[in-house]
Image (tube, rainbow, N blue to C red):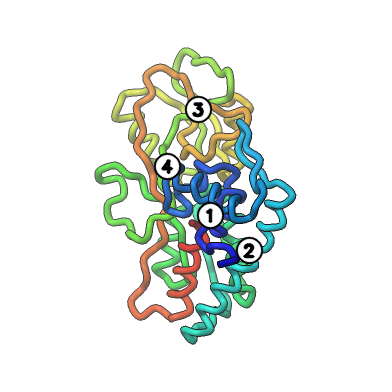
Amino acid sequence: MSGFDLDQLRTLVAVLDAGSLTAAAPKVFLSQSSVSEQMRKLEERAGQALLIRGKSGVSATPAGERLLAHARAILALSEEAYRDLRGVALQGELRLCITDYFRPGDVAGMLRRLNEQYPQVRMHVTIMKSGAIEAAYERGEIDVGISMVILERGAGKGRPQGPVLRRESLLWMAADGAQATRGALPLLALPETCALRQYAERLLSRRSVPYAVAHVASGVAGLQLAIAAGLGVACLNESALAPGITRAQWPGLPPLPEVEFRLLPPRPGEDRFIELAREAIVRAMR
């Protein structure tokens, strides 16, 4: 039988979007070895190499680029056929709110895939703090929200629990080559309303680590600039590591838990369009 396997095409898209087999694995809910095997079978099916493998990850060969374009179109058509046969039309306006801590690369890929698969959906995307997202969701001001939950006993108590999109570690971060200084820890943070700042300050206080807020940024991008500039140490999720930023080697810093990024749970009696949009977002994050 000629043709390509949809799961293998979906994995190809995930691999090239993520830039590596390892990074693609959780997006398609497979092990790294299973992703590698799927790519081997797909290249065998195509009769030529599709990926260029290197120390920094993978990229597409010219044949891989051509098949990637076909794969996106095929997967979008598969979604369209499913919706047509199920009598589902996803179109309308969607108010989507995402925490600033959620990795920008994943957001960009998610929005691109949603636009490819659901061109009739007009999205209004806002970046906010998790607490503000949850409050706006409760007031009915947004349709779908992605917030961050700290995975430590009591830290996320009472927070909404929805589908998990991603889990990663929190880290203390500083500039490359930064050296610990005497005196209070120079803490870099977002404004006082930020739940992660509040958590970090409580943790430092409980562990009797002296600190002083040395710089306040309005968002994660500004905080990354302050870290890279060597202004101090910040508590951020692992995907915020960037050129010029590394794990802080300050003595006495307490260990940090993991965080989860979750879709806020459905409201009772939620509109069918919002329900379908939520399901589409979960698929787009794979």
Disc 1 is placed on an element classified as helix
* Mark 4 surroundings: few (<14), some (14-19) or many (≥20) residues within 10 A: some
Horizontal relation, residue 35 to residue 123: left or right: left
Helix, strand or loop status at disc 2: helix
Residue lying at 43% horizontally and 67% vertically, measured from the top left = 137
For residue 246, the mark is none
Which mark sits nearer the N-terminus, 1 or 4?
1
Farthest residue in the bottom direction?
87
Question: What whole-number distance in Å separates the C-alpha atoms at marks 1 and 3?
Answer: 38 Å
Tell which of 169 and 284 is nearer to you: 284
Judging from the image, what secondary structure is the residue with disc 4 in?
Answer: strand
Crowding at dot 2, Cα within 10 Å, few <14 / some 14-19 / many 20+, comes out as some
Q: Viewed as shown, does residue 70 lie left or right of 133?
A: right
Bin the neighbour count of mark 3 within 10 Å (Cα to Cα): few under 14, some 14-19, many 20 and up. many
SS at circle 3: strand
Query: Toward which corner of the image does residue 3 lie, by quadrant?
Result: bottom right
Q: Dot 2 corresponds to which residue? A: 72
Q: Amino acid at mark 3?
A: Val
The x and y percentages for residue 23 are 51, 43
Spatial separation of the CA atoms under disc 4 and disc 2: 28 Å
Q: Residues within 10 Å of mark 1 (few under 14, many from 20)?
A: many
Farthest residue toward the front?
1
Reading the image, the residue beneath label 3 is 233
Q: Report the residue that reaches farthest toward the top.
A: 182
Amino acid type, residue under disc 2 in the picture: Arg
Question: In the rendered view, would you say 110 is above or below 150?
Answer: below
Quarter residue 215 falls in: top right
Q: Which residue is mark 4?
A: 168
Callouts 4 and 2 close, C-beta under 8 Å? no
